[in-house]
Image: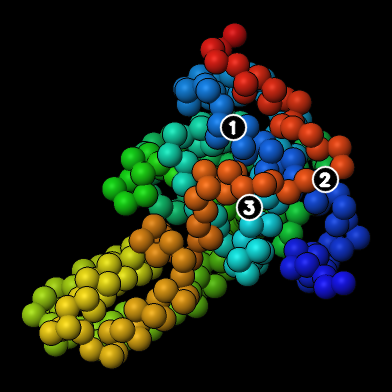
Amino acid sequence: MEIDRFTKYLAATGLSAREAEIRTYVAQGAKDVRAIMTSPLSPDDLQQIAAREVHPTTRGRQVAGIIWYLTSLAVERNQAFLSGAFLCLDPHGQLSAFFLAIGTPRTSSHLRRHSAPGCTGGVDLVVDGTLPPVANDHRHVLFIAIANDKHRGTCLFLKPEPYGVSGFKDFGHHADRYVRSLARRFRFDRFVKAFSEAVAHIPDGVSAIEEVGRKGAGEGIAGMHAYLTTKTRDKRLSKPSMVELLRQLEAEYDFVSLRFGNEVCFDLGAEISRPLPGAPGVLGPSPSLLWLKVSKPV
């Protein structure tokens, strides 16, 4: 019998011994996400009640379940990462409201141009000294709630991190992560160079190159993709190098027009409409979320 991809992932991350427990987290996280995103409550009401009803001792476990569910989806697509983030389309804002309710406000250098004050926070996964099983030594989840973005609508950025934001050790961690990010920037720069060479002959090619160069990796990729998609449809302008670059972009990234960077992107509305993963004893949302089914705050 062939070993499934998620089992292989757990083996690679040294978590095979806890596979049954982790699959329970995946199943519970999936059902919690579905319950949150399909609740009849408005985001404001959901945030108000969650802040009151979701006890601090359960928050780390619930967020760990959600992260494991997203990780399992990423593994299905062969997009698992050691260091990365998830971008979740959240059209009605319920999942964002949930994280805003249970998280602690914090600052972050990520997506400052796209987030409003008060919409960035974090959740520590360690509760009373106990850490749920997590991959890659992650102990904290950064979240950024983004509302009414021009290209993405309302969405939630989630980034598992090994450290929080206080102390010298945390500072050292973030400095190390910055250095590693330069490698990702190099890959983006490689695409920009190829884009510049491919479209320089087009009348508005120079302005398109300048616009892409001003943007960050994610929006730059989206800009290149949109420009190439339009121009390759015009046989007078299209060249084989443009067609090939468009193919490379689409092979490298999914949800190209939605990206801020190298996130794993999910249309969660579509994901939760599929059959959800199951596990023994997981029959519905977490007990602390049963109030999600009510239509008015109590």
The answer to whether residue 166 of the structure is visible from this angle is: no
Say which amino acid is labelled 1.
Ile
Assess disc 3: are there few (<14), some (14-19) or many (≥20) residues with their C-alpha within 10 Å of its C-alpha: many
Of the 4 image quadrants, the one containing the N terminus is bottom right
Residue 254 left/right relative to 230? right
Assess disc 1: are there few (<14), some (14-19) or many (≥20) residues with their C-alpha within 10 Å of its C-alpha: many
Residue 291 sits in quarter? top right
Say which amino acid is labelled 2.
Ala
Q: CA distance from mark 1 to mark 3?
A: 15 Å
* Residue at (50, 50) in percent of width and height: 267
Q: CA distance from mark 1 to mark 2?
A: 19 Å
Q: Nearer the viewer, mark 3 or mark 2?
A: 2
Q: Earlier in the sequence, mark 1 or mark 3?
A: 1
Q: Nearer the viewer, residue 138 or 13?
A: 13
Q: Nearer the viewer, residue 221 or 187?
A: 221
Residue 256 sits in quarter? bottom left
The answer to whether residue 292 of the structure is visible from this angle is: yes
Q: CA distance from mark 3 to mark 2?
A: 16 Å
- The residue that mark 3 highlights is 70
Q: Earlier in the sequence, mark 1 or mark 2?
A: 1
Which residue in the rendered view is the most extreme toward the top? 298
Residue 36's label in the rendered image is 1
State whether residue 30 is above or below residue 47. Answer: below
Residue 279's label in the rendered image is 2
Say which amino acid is labelled 3.
Leu
Could you tell me residue 287's position as x and y percent?
Answer: 76, 26
Of the 4 image quadrants, the one containing the C terminus is top right
Could you tell me residue 16's position as x and y percent?
Answer: 87, 63
Q: Secondary structure at mark 3?
A: helix
